């Protein structure tokens, strides 16, 4: 498992946090995701054999948020 921190822009409320948590939770290979509105980031534990960091960023962007 690997850990990564993804900066997220465009979050304005806890609904956004729940949305991103749900999106990341459906990505195969994601063990856990901790999204923080205050920090503007997601801390993600994932299996690099199943999913790449780039794919995680794309999933967040597909949900309507900026990610890097």
Image (cartoon, helix red, strand yellow):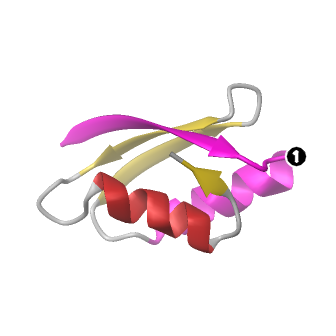
Q: Which residues are magenta?
A: 1-26
Q: Quadrant of the N terminus?
A: top left
Residue 25 visible in the current orientation: no
Q: Position of residue 53 (x, y in %)?
A: 32, 52
Q: Residue at x 57, y 50 (%)?
A: 67
Q: Position of residue 66 (x, y in %)?
A: 65, 54
Residue 18 position (above or below residue 5): below
Q: How many marks?
A: 1
Q: Residue at x 20, y 53 (%)?
A: 47
| Element on which disc 1 rests | loop
Q: Residue furthest left?
A: 49
Residue 65 visible in the current orientation: yes
Q: Residue at x 70, y 68 (%)?
A: 64
Q: Is residue 10 left or right of residue 55?
A: right
Structural crowding at the residue carrying mark 1, measured as other residues with C-alpha within 10 Å and reported as few (<14), some (14–19) or many (≥20):
few
Of 24 and 40, which appears nearest the observer? 40
Of 26 and 11, which appears nearest the observer? 11
Q: Position of residue 6 (x, y in %)?
A: 49, 40
Q: Which residue is mark 1?
A: 12
């Amino acid at each position: 498992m690997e850990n990564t921190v993804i900066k997220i822009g465009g979050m304005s409320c806890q609904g956004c946090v729940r949305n991103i948590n749900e999106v990341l939770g459906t990505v195969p290979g994601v063990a856990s995701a901790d999204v923080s509105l205050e920090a503007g980031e997601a801390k993600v534990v994932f299996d690099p054999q199943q999913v790449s960091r780039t794919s995680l960023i794309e999933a967040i962007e597909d949900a309507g948020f900026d990610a890097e």
